[in-house]
Amino acid sequence: MARTEEASALASGAFSGTLAVIADGKIVYARAFGKIGAGRSSTPDIETQFNAGSISKVFTAVAMLQLRERGKIDLDKPVTDYLPEFRMKDERSGKITIRMLPITPQGSQGPTTTGFSPHTKSHNMSGKHWRGCETAA
């Protein structure tokens, strides 16, 4: 029954994405699912790129907690203690801690580090909403 419901959901385009299984550093299975594009009429392939959205926060949080358990990081230290190249135009960016990284407010984008495309970002820091943090020049 569950497989029938799963197949029906995938066929309807309820989920769109790609899946890859990697064993010993090699892709052993890859498949694309769902519908994409205007009107959701196109079918993705395994080369189709999707925006990860907030799901990446889960992976980031798990990795951070694993590093904390191993004594490699302190969640309350500034990001710049571990990534000195992390820079933003707003001087308060030096107060961004490791703990804050996966916790950007809904609807806002995370911090941009040097070397990435300069887009205006919006953040919430200690209850104060602030804008204008672009990539440092």
Image: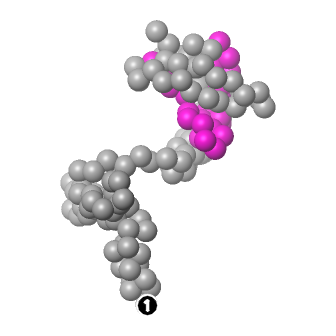
Color theme of the render: one colour
Residue type, mark 1 in image = Met
The residues colored magenta run 91-114
126 sits left or right of 113 in the view: right
Q: Mark 1 points at which residue?
A: 1
Helix or strand or loop: what does disc 1 sit on? Answer: loop
Q: Which residue lies furthest to the top in this view?
A: 137
Residue plotted at (44% across, 48% down): 52
- For the question of whether residue 74 can be seen, the reply is no
Q: In the rendered view, would you say 19 is above or below 120?
A: below
Residue 101 falls inside the magenta stretch: yes
Q: In the rendered view, would you say 98 is above or below 132?
A: below
Q: Residue furthest bottom?
A: 1
Percent coordinates x, y for residue 3 in the rendering: 39, 84
Residue plotted at (33% across, 54% down): 37
Percent coordinates x, y for residue 85 in the rendering: 48, 16
Residue 73 or residue 33, whichever sits in front: 33
Percent coordinates x, y for residue 41 in the rendering: 30, 62
Residue 99, picture quadrant: top right
